[in-house]
Image (spheres, rainbow, N blue to C red):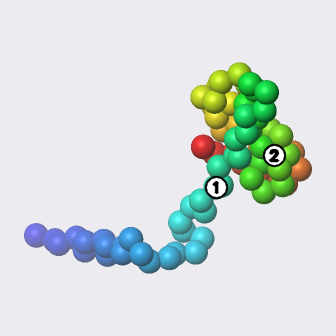
Amino acid sequence: MQQHPTPTQVSPGLHRPGLDPQPVPEPALHLLGGIWIASCPTCGYPLTTARTQQRVERRAARRRCPVCHQDGAL
């Protein structure tokens, strides 16, 4: 009977550059005059607008900033 080596368990505090996905900053949300605005957290470019917070969050998650090319991931 052949034994298979067990994979080495990775410590949750261990930083593995290049292997772990980089956290993406969430878009900044602003309420101005009853309209929600989602802007890029890096450069401040307005990504999208909507009347509800949930809708602007969904729209911003699908947008990529045309200025700094930061993905919007909520």
Type of amino acid at the residue the image marks with label 2: Cys
Q: Residues within 10 Å of mark 2 (few under 14, many from 20)?
A: many
Sequence-wise first label, 2 or 1: 1
Q: Which labelled disc corresponds to residue 65?
A: 2
How far is the residue under mark 2 from the one under mark 1?
12 Å
Q: Which residue is mark 1?
A: 24
Q: Residues within 10 Å of mark 1 (few under 14, many from 20)?
A: few
Say whether residue 62 is visible: no
**Could you tell me residue 69's position as x and y percent?**
81, 51
Would you say 55 lies left or right of 44 here? left
Would you say 57 lies left or right of 65 here? left
- Name the residue located 83 percent from the left edge and 40 percent from the top edge: 46
Q: Quadrant of residue 62?
A: top right
- Name the residue located 64 percent from the left edge and 55 percent from the top edge: 24
Q: Residue furthest front?
A: 33
Would you say 51 lies left or right of 16 here? right
Locate the N terminus by quadrant. Answer: bottom left
Type of amino acid at the residue the image marks with label 1: Val
Q: Quadrant of residue 63?
A: top right
**Could you tell me residue 23's position as x and y percent?**
59, 59
- Name the residue located 71 percent from the left edge and 22 percent from the top edge: 51
Say whether residue 19 is visible: yes
Total number of numbered labels? 2
Locate the C terminus by quadrant. Answer: top right
Q: Secondary structure at mark 1?
A: loop
**Could you tell me residue 4's position as x and y percent?**
22, 70
**Could you tell me residue 64's position as x and y percent?**
77, 43
Establish if 16 lies above or below 41: below
Q: Quadrant of residue 8?
A: bottom left
Q: Secondary structure at mark 2?
A: loop
- Name the residue located 83 percent from the left edge and 50 percent from the top edge: 44
